[in-house]
Image: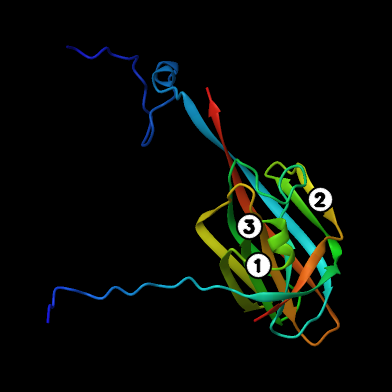
Amino acid sequence: MAQPRLSVVPARGVGRKDYSTVIEHATQASMRGHQTRYSSVVSITLPTVPFGFIYTIYFTFPGGVVAAPATPRHFYNVINTSGRNALVLAGFYRFNSWADYLIFNVDEWYGTVYGYGKAELHWTNGIKTEEGKVYAAGICEYSERPTFTIHMTSHSLFEEVVYG
Amino acid sequence: MDKGKKKIKVKKTKKIKGEVIKKVKAKGKMITTTGDGEIIGELENPEVLLVRLE
């Protein structure tokens, strides 16, 4: 049986053929994934502590809740920077509940890294959040000054499925 | 001795343990925004935990 021929799509140069409404109709998806990018940014001033101590800060989700929502979020990085050439810490932790967070009962430790002036954690495939769990980052700087200021940035993607 | 059998080493998950010393009121602001810049979460002077790692 002969294949029905679609309208001719003109091609100019090298690469993808030009737009055609016929092709768009033929390849229209019934379900699409949509991703929204989120950035969490904090600039925080804290008293200095000796090495071996860390500060943890929790992430909030839409609505100001600390427990991760049913729709997963994918965390891709945690970047801590300070203005000084001093040892900086970056960490990322998962807790089963808010009560576990308050006693630092870590469910999953995703990593702790140190660096001078800057410490960053990266996950190529992202860390998928699980519903009801609490996520927190570790932030600290070890210097001889009384206080320190840390700038933390974390990027994440929120995936939702759109039925078209 | 059976040379075909190989011992498989199981990598143990490294656990972190710590003890919470106190809650600290930090000076600063935590903001979560979407890619379009829309603010979806804001924390003024968030509470952070001071933890001693074991």
Measured from the top left, where is residue A33 in percent x and y?
52, 34
- Residue A55 appears at what percent x and percent y? 74, 72
Q: Chain of mark 3?
A: A
Discs 3, 1: same chain: yes
- Which of pointers 1 and 2 indicates the residue nearer the eye? 1
- Tag 1 near tag 2, CB within 8 Å: no
- Is B23 displayed left or right of A25 in the figure? right
How packed mark 3 is, by other alpha carbons closer than 10 Å (few <14, some 14-19, many 20 or more), is some
What's the amino acid at mark 3? Answer: Asn
Marked residue chain, label 2: B
Cα separation between marks 1 and 2: 25 Å
Label 2 Cα crowd, 10 Å radius (few <14 / some 14-19 / many 20+) = some
Residue A28 is tagged as none
Label 1 crowding class (10 Å Cα cut-off): few <14, some 14-19, many 20+?
many
- Residues marked 2 and 3 touching at CB (< 8 Å): no
Query: Would you place residue A65 above or below residue B53 in this image?
Result: above
The residue indicated by pointer 3 is: A96
- Give the CA separation, mark 3 to mark 1: 8 Å
Numbered disc in front, either 2 or 3:
3
Q: Quadrant of residue B9?
A: bottom left
Q: Chain of mark 1?
A: A
Q: Is residue B44 left or right of residue A121?
A: right
